[in-house]
């Protein structure tokens, strides 16, 4: 994996500008998650691009959706789904790799499927995932390893999320501050044993909503 990415990035005739606004190239490395071992596909359709720098230097492995593809879509990796027709050319992200700039050993990490990466709680992974989400918004989706399911890159505001889950009415949520809405979500998740309050408080809004099952 490490060699294949570095070799292809050195040959400009193998790259082109892609949907992320950066050079992309055909991915020739591993398509299995280094955490859970799931195989996420492969072949000539798989692309790779490099994003960000420093502590959140990132590679993503993805493919482009075919025209008229119909998928089950969710706002979180295990949440309720709705059917959506994905536009041709939308990026379907399958693997996320920590770039060499972000690691003390100067080497890329193993690739991780989106499900496993969503479960990481360290600060750098959180910043990387949120940055990737905002970069991907309107351009594509994260791909779940469970069936043919996608989830959107950007979660709804917590205010909308607690209404969707039935924790507050729309009128009640409208009278709450953003901090109050977040605290409401943390309390409800703690009741359902998603984690201790201190652990949940250390998570970003996206991680809280992504952890929901």
Image (cartoon, helix red, strand yellow):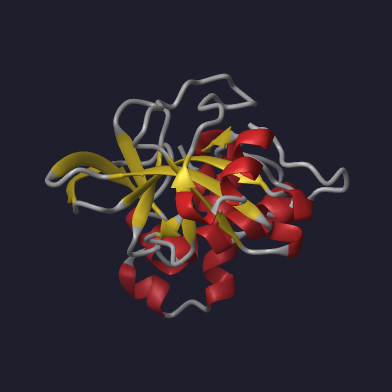
User: Is 63 rendered above or below residue 146?
Assistant: below
Q: Residue 103, can we see it?
A: yes
Residue found at the far left of this picture: 68
Out of 117 and 77, give the one closest to the viewer: 117
Lateral position of residue 100 relative to residue 141, left or right: right
Where on the picture, by quarter, is residue 131?
bottom right
Out of 8 and 182, give the one closest to the viewer: 8
Lateral position of residue 148 relative to residue 10, left or right: left
Residue 150 in the image, given as x and y percentages of width and height = 34, 42
Q: Residue at x 63, y 64 (%)?
A: 52
User: Is 139 rendered above or below residue 70?
Assistant: below
Lateral position of residue 179 relative to residue 18, left or right: right
Where on the picture, by quarter, is residue 65?
top left
Q: Residue at x 81, y 48 (%)?
A: 103
Q: Residue at x 75, y 63 (%)?
A: 54
Residue 204 in the image, given as x and y percentages of width and height = 62, 59
Residue 47 in the image, given as x and y percentages of width and height = 43, 43
Q: Residue at x 34, y 61 (%)?
A: 139
- Which image quarter holds the N terminus? top right
Residue 136 in the image, given as x and y percentages of width and height = 42, 60
User: Is 130 rendered above or below residue 47?
Assistant: below
């Amino acid at each position: 994996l490490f060699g294949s990415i570095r070799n292809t990035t050195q040959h400009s005739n193998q790259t082109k500008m892609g949907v992320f606004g950066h050079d992309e190239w055909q991915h020739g490395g591993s398509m299995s998650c280094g955490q859970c071992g799931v195989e996420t596909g492969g072949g000539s359709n798989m692309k790779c691009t490099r994003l960000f720098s420093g502590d959140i230097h990132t590679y993503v492995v993805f493919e482009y959706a075919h025209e008229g593809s119909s998928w089950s879509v969710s706002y979180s990796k295990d949440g309720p789904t709705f059917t959506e027709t994905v536009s041709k050319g939308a990026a379907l992200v399958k693997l996320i790799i920590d770039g060499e700039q972000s690691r003390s050993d100067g080497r890329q990490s193993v690739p991780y499927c989106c499900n496993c990466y969503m479960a990481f709680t360290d600060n750098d992974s959180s910043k990387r995932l949120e940055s990737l989400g905002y970069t991907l918004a309107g351009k594509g989706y994260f791909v779940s390893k469970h069936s043919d399911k996608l989830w959107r890159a950007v979660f709804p505001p917590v205010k909308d999320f607690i209404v969707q889950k039935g924790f507050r009415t729309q009128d009640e949520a409208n009278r709450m501050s953003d901090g109050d809405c977040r605290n409401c979500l943390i309390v409800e998740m703690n009741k359902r044993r998603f984690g201790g309050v201190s652990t949940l408080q250390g998570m970003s809004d996206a991680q809280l909503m992504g952890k929901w099952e």
